[in-house]
Amino acid sequence: MIQVERFHDTDALYARAVAIIEEVKATGAKTFGLATGGTMEPLYERLCASTIDFSDAVSFNLDEYIGLSETHPESYHYYMQQQLFDQKPFQQSHLPNGFASDLEAEAERYETLLQQYPLDFQLLGIGVNGHIGFNEPGTSFQSTTHVVTLSSSTRAANARFFEDPEEVPTRALTMGIASIMRAKFILLIATGEKKRAVLEKVLMGVSTEEVPATVLANHPRVVILTDLQ
Ligand code: F6R
């Protein structure tokens, strides 16, 4: 079931996101699925400034580009280190290794780890094409961690983070839709006009693999925070 909370003020939206994470943590959550992207930056800034302690928790990121080293400034390893982990360390933090020589084996390794540490919580942003993680339109709802070819719309949307748009990797490793749906509680944040059309599709409650985030209508516990009215 999806519960939507709408905010006029993004400060209030992010304060609510922090409060939800604090509450989830206080009620015993130990495994946290995390996301990257522009939407999460204000959240991580606030989490860093909070008193919340993740040192007894384990994190799993949704995805990582293929071909960027952990120290590449646009890799999600680097993003997480800068935005959160340097200031709020977890007991263990996992991301897929986009530099692995055998990518299929890496996807399997990550999925096995996720099954060993079932996610109590999963944070999600949403792509304008409805992607969650890097599960692009058309991805099976049964998918587990896998290698994806990024759509041109996703590469164009993420080009803003790179000096040269040609540098945006063409492939990534991502948790699958089934991997995400196993999380006990999902918090999705969608801000800005660009997300309006896709959010409306998600809230219609009709699931279709053409819009990956519409799968959330089938999950028992989803909260969406948005500044869209
Ligand atoms: C990031 C991720 C993506 C983003 C989505 C929105 O780890 O998995 O699904 O959440 O692309 O990105 P922003 O927040 O930059 O609009």
Image (cartoon, rainbow, N blue to C red):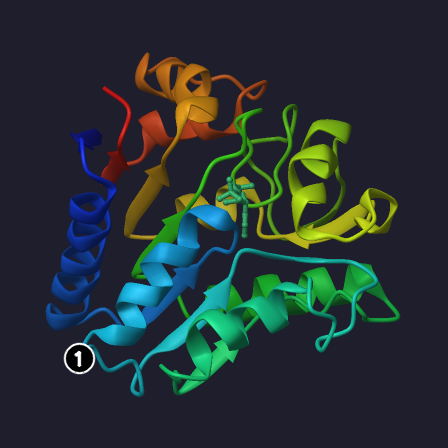
Q: Quadrant of residue 7?
A: top left
Foreground of the two, 65 or 104: 65
Label 1, secondary structure: give it: loop
Q: Quadrant of residue 109?
A: bottom right
Q: Residue at x 54, y 26 (%)?
A: 128
Looking at the image, is 115 positioned above or below residue 186?
A: below
Foreground of the two, 51 or 53: 51
Residue 119 left/right relative to 62: left
Q: Residue at x 36, y 15 (%)?
A: 200
Crowding near pointer 1: few (<14 within 10 Å), some, many (20+)?
few
Place of residue 43 in the rendered image (x, y in percent of width and height, measured from the top left): 33, 58
Residue 38 left/right relative to 188: right
Place of residue 17 in the rendered image (x, y in percent of width and height, measured from the top left): 22, 52
Residue 159 left/right relative to 118: right
Instruction: Identify the amino acid type marked 1.
Output: Thr
Q: Quadrant of the C terminus?
A: top left
Residue under numbered circle 1: 51
Place of residue 27 in the rendered image (x, y in percent of width and height, measured from the top left): 11, 68
Residue 102 left/right relative to 12: right
Q: Residue at x 77, y 29 (%)?
A: 152
